[in-house]
Image (tube, rainbow, N blue to C red):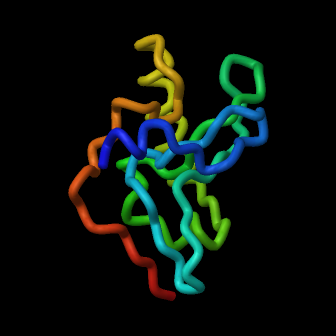
């Protein structure tokens, strides 16, 4: 299954980079649509930067993120996660080969 996910794009981000399955995999919304990432624009070192809101530390806030209710806590968690990755020379977004959710069930949101 990983091989099929690695090459699969889930559309484009605002900056035209390919979206993949994100840090948590596919998240099924109540209407049946699937969300994998949600980008938010933040200021990092004086530059507007797109980062993912859906990061492991925001798993308990998925309902808020899906409803585009980006709280300060969600933003702070996302920024901290992105900064840590960027200091390691990585993209703030999950990239092919980093997915940790293989073999796990999809997350299904209800609200």
Residue placed at 46% from the left, 86% from the top?
A: 110
Of 102 and 56, the residue lying toward us:
102
Total number of numbered discs in the rendering: 0
* Rendered location of residue 21, percent (x, y): 47, 48
Q: Is residue 23 left or right of residue 101?
A: right
* Rendered location of residue 96, percent (x, y): 42, 32
Of 52 and 99, the residue lying toward us:
99
Of 89 and 81, the residue lying toward us:
89
* Rendered location of residue 10, percent (x, y): 60, 50
Question: Where is 18 relative to 87, above or below?
Answer: below
Question: Where is 30 relative to 87, above or below?
Answer: below
Residue placed at 47% from the left, 44% from the top?
A: 77
Residue placed at 71% from the left, 43% from the top?
A: 12
* Rendered location of residue 101, percent (x, y): 28, 51
Residue placed at 46% from the left, 31% from the top?
A: 95
Q: Is residue 67 left or right of residue 96?
A: right
Question: Where is 43 relative to 22, above or below?
Answer: above
């Amino acid at each position: 299954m990983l091989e099929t996910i690695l090459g699969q794009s889930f559309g484009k981000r605002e900056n035209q980079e390919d979206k993949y399955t994100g840090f948590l995999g596919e998240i099924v919304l109540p209407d049946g649509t699937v969300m994998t990432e949600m980008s938010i624009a933040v200021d990092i070192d004086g530059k507007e930067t797109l980062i993912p809101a859906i990061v492991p530390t925001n798993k308990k806030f998925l309902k808020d993120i899906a409803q585009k209710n980006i709280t300060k806590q969600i933003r702070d968690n996302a920024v901290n996660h992105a900064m840590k990755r960027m200091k390691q020379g990585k993209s703030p977004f999950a990239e092919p080969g980093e997915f940790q959710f293989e073999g796990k069930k999809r997350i299904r949101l209800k609200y």
